[in-house]
Structure formats: C-alpha cells, structure tokens
Amino acid sequence: MTPLRTPDSHFTNLVDYPFTPNYINVDDTEGGSLRLHYVDEGPKHAPIILLLHGEPTWSYLYRKMIPPLATAGFRVIAPDLIGFGRSDKPSERSDYTYQRHVDWLRALLVQLDLQDITLFCQDWGGLLGLRLLAEEQDRFRRTVAANTMLPTGDRHPGDAFIQWQQLSQNIPIFATGKIIAGACVNAVSADTIAAYDAPFPDESYKAGARQFPMLVPVSPEDPAAIPNQQAWAVLSKMQKPFLTAFSDKDPITKGGDAAFQKMIPGCNGQAHTTIQGGGHFLQEDQSEQLVQVILNFIGATLHK
C-alpha cells in the first residue's frame, strides 16, 4: 500500500479551524502503517463525545460544533477517516474496503482507550460508527444518528443514492468542496469550499473519495452485507440510549430515522427530532441546533 500525505501547508489558516493536530499510526494490513489524524479538544479526563464524519468531508465539518461541546465540559474527538482530511490517503482505490475502515477507527478507540463514549455519526460516520457501536458496545454510552444508515444490501438504497453513486464515478473532476456545498441548504462561502478542497492537492489524492460510494452494500453479495446484518442483530437488542436527529431536506437518507426508531430498543422514549433547515451536511447548515440536541440528550440520559 502506497499512501499519499497532504502537505501540512494545505491546512494553514483555514477559516474557523484552529485545532492542534493529533496522530496515531494504524495497521494498513499489508505490513505497513498509516497515519490517522484526529482533533482532541476539551478536558482530557472528561466524558467523551466522538464525532464521525462521512464522504467526502473531514473533521473540518465539525469546526463549529467542537468548541461549544468542549466548553460544555466534554472531551471532543473528531478523527479524519483514512483517505480524508489530514489522515494518510492510500493511492489505490482497491486499498479502501469497508472492513479496513471499521478496523482503522477501532484502532483509534483502542489506542486512546476511549470509554463512556457519546457517539455522533453522520453519513459514512454512521456506516462505520454503528458497526463499532455493535462490536465494541462496552465503550459506548449513547448514540446520536443523523442522516445516516447501516445498509445490509437487501433493500434498494433509493434513487437519490444511486444518482450520487453514478455521479461520483463519472465526473472527470471530483470537486469536493462544491459537492459538499451542493448538499447544503445554506450558502457555503468560498473559503469554506477551499477548506474542504484542502486535503486533496490533485485527483490522485481522491481514491478514497471516489471509492466510498461503491463500498455501500447494495446487494446481499456485498462483502459488508453479512457483517452489517450481524451488527443489526446486536443493535436490535441494544437498550443504550439512541437518538435520531435527521434533517428535513436530505433526499438520500430521508426516512432512515423511522427505521432506527423501529428497530433499536434504545430509541424508545427518546426526544427524537428533525433538524429544520438542514441538508445532507446538517453540521454545516445547523450546527447550533445539533450542539443543543447533543447536550440535551446527554443531560436527559445521564442515569440511563
């Protein structure tokens, strides 16, 4: 595996992103290692809020949520998935598999010995984070799921996702910042678009961004179908508090909140909410609402 590493100069003076970088090394499964970046803010021995991003974003997506959550007294950890942000980027699309990404994130939990986690997951942050919730459940206290899913390949993923999947494979230039801006309701500034482009000096760095849409299980024969079914078997019995906070304007995950509420016992009695005025990347559109939802949920479930 040959990883690419975005020069640090690409991450200087990004708007609203003053965070000190932190790194761990994870096994690339081929005899080498990859550097995984994460933001780590707030008191080091405080309860943990883990913020997991998706495709094709990075921890910059959480820049407006990290400070108020840390100020509220939590240790806030926001990793960059391998292939994104300040993390290393394997150069071949075949380097990216669903299982490898689960295991690379698991390495973060193990190496930092994260416990008593409040998980917030969106997009691929849920496809990966919910697997970890099922497989490492003793590390987690509660979960907030937003605009995400855990597909098992036995249901059609929806026309909006298929259109995105086809677009991601056919466009000659994968314009990351503009793609993210196009999935938001509110206008996204040129500086913010540039920050989402920053991890990718050229197209060679975008193997992960290109491959991720193809890793979503859309048939029962997909390699991730059975592990995801096994995860659902655990989640369908899990009593730990589970909250949905989907947005009102995301065609890709629309209705997914109802599926979680129906399947996961920990959803019972929770104050599920719909984030008004939010597109797919509701962290961009409605960060203040999301922060309040997370803090209210933690407060309401302290003794559960």
Image (spheres, rainbow, N blue to C red):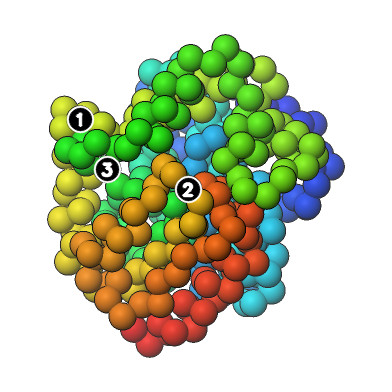
- Helix, strand or loop at label 3? It is loop
Query: Mark 1 sits on what residue?
Result: 219
Any part of residue 162 in sight: yes
Q: Residue 193's mark?
A: none
Three-letter code for the amino acid on which mark 3 is drawn? Pro
- Helix, strand or loop at label 2? It is loop
Q: Nearer the viewer, residue 42 or 162?
A: 162
The part of the image, by quadrant, that contains residue 216 is top left
Residue at 35% in and 59% down? 257
Residue at 36% in and 45% down? 127
Q: Nearer the viewer, residue 142 or 219?
A: 219
* Quadrant in which the N terminus is drawn: top left
- Residue 33 to residue 119: above or below: above
- At label 1, counting other C-alpha atoms closer than 10 Å, the crowd grade (few under 14, some 14-19, many 20 or more) is some
- Structural distance between the alpha carbons of marks 3 and 2: 17 Å
Query: Mark 2 sits on what residue?
Result: 250
- Structural distance between the alpha carbons of marks 2 and 1: 23 Å
- At label 3, counting other C-alpha atoms closer than 10 Å, the crowd grade (few under 14, some 14-19, many 20 or more) is many
> Residue 191 at x, y = what percent?
80, 39
Any part of residue 31 in sight: no
- Residue 287 to residue 184: above or below: below
Residue at 52% in and 71% down? 294
> Residue 227 at x, y = what percent?
20, 42
Three-letter code for the amino acid on which mark 2 is drawn? Asp
- At label 2, counting other C-alpha atoms closer than 10 Å, the crowd grade (few under 14, some 14-19, many 20 or more) is many
Q: Nearer the viewer, mark 3 or mark 2?
A: 2
- Helix, strand or loop at label 1? It is loop
Specify whether 16 is left or right of 94. Answer: right
Three-letter code for the amino acid on which mark 1 is drawn? Ser
Q: Nearer the viewer, mark 2 or mark 1?
A: 2
Say if mark 3 contacts mark 2, CB within 8 Å.
no
Q: Residue 151's mark?
A: 3
